[in-house]
Image (cartoon, rainbow, N blue to C red):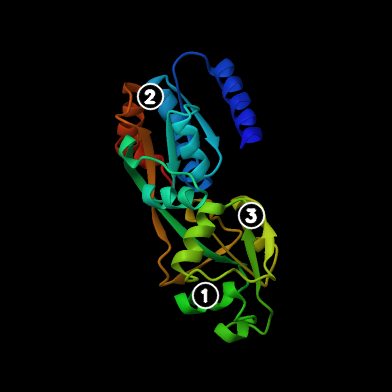
Amino acid sequence: MKKSAVILSALMLAAVVAHGGEEIRVGGGGAAMLGVFQPVKPHFEKATGIALINLQSSPKGGLVNLLEGRVDLSAAAHSLDSILLALAADRMSIDKSQLVEHRIGINRTTVIVHPSNRVSQLSREQLKGIFTGKLSNWQEVGGDDREILVVWGRGTPGQNSEFITRVLDGESVTKDALESTNYNEIKETVAATPEAVGINPKSVADSTIRLVDTDAPLSTPIVAVTLGKPSAKVRKLLDYLLGEGRAHIRQ
């Protein structure tokens, strides 16, 4: 945590120097950043003259940085309650009454495969079998006779936690999964590997991969969290996200 705090402080200082004037510092998970704050940034800055400084970490890290005063707003593609539970598991007790949750969008986690994969639909049970390793060949779910390669991100903890809880019923991902880093690398690996399957926010999807339909519960709220009542400038951002800015949000 100390090392990440130093890096975050350096990034913040560089951002202040580069922009000058009024700014809003937002910290949090990658899905919220990629789906909301990165695409909104240039439009919000043009409309208000306020610099939007996006500092990606993790849902838990964003909330800790908010509590310690490093950011003005934390963001995540998960409910505040789920983040607090995750922090409680790390033996961090936080008083929820001091926090205000603002729902600003929906994150749609998608199942992605190589474009050549002819499997178009997977049930929740099939997904559970694939990601836990109980199903190991695409032929078992209507595809070609080809081994299944699960691509799993080590740098996407919030997404992983939700998927393990809601789809895998708490079971571990297969030990044979290919470890990737962030959302973009997951997508690039699946795009380059015919037998691969992974999960990613819909906001990251493009023509290099194909989305698979599923009945699994993969949508989660995108929330912003403030420490108490939002300041005037943060209120401007929240109002923008719920109004004019919605046209730029990827979800």
Eyeballing the image, is 161 above or below 5? below
Q: Which tag, 2 or 3, sits closer to the chain's start?
A: 2
Residue 19 point in image, percent of width and height: 53, 18
Q: The residue under label 3 is which amino acid type?
A: Arg
**Cβ–Cβ below 8 Å for labels 2 and 3?**
no
Tell me the tag on residue 22.
none
Q: Which tag, 1 or 2, sits closer to the chain's start?
A: 2
Closer to the camera: disc 1 or disc 2? 1
* Mark 2 → mark 3, Cα distance in angstroms: 36 Å
Name the residue at 61% across, 26% down: 11
Q: Secondary structure at mark 1?
A: helix
Residue 64 point in image, percent of width and height: 49, 37
Name the residue at 68% across, 80% down: 146
Q: The residue under label 1 is which amino acid type?
A: Lys
Residue 74 point in image, percent of width and height: 44, 37
Q: Quadrant of the N terminus?
A: top right
Q: Secondary structure at mark 2?
A: helix
Tell me the tag on residue 47.
2
* Mark 1 → mark 2, Cα distance in angstroms: 45 Å
53 or 80: nearer the viewer: 80
**Cβ–Cβ below 8 Å for labels 1 and 3?**
no
Name the residue at 61% across, 21% down: 14
Q: Residues within 10 Å of mark 3 (few under 14, many from 20)?
A: some
Q: The residue under label 2 is which amino acid type?
A: Ala
Eyeballing the image, is 146 above or below 107? below
Tell me the tag on residue 154.
3
Q: Secondary structure at mark 3?
A: loop
Q: Which residue is mark 1?
A: 128
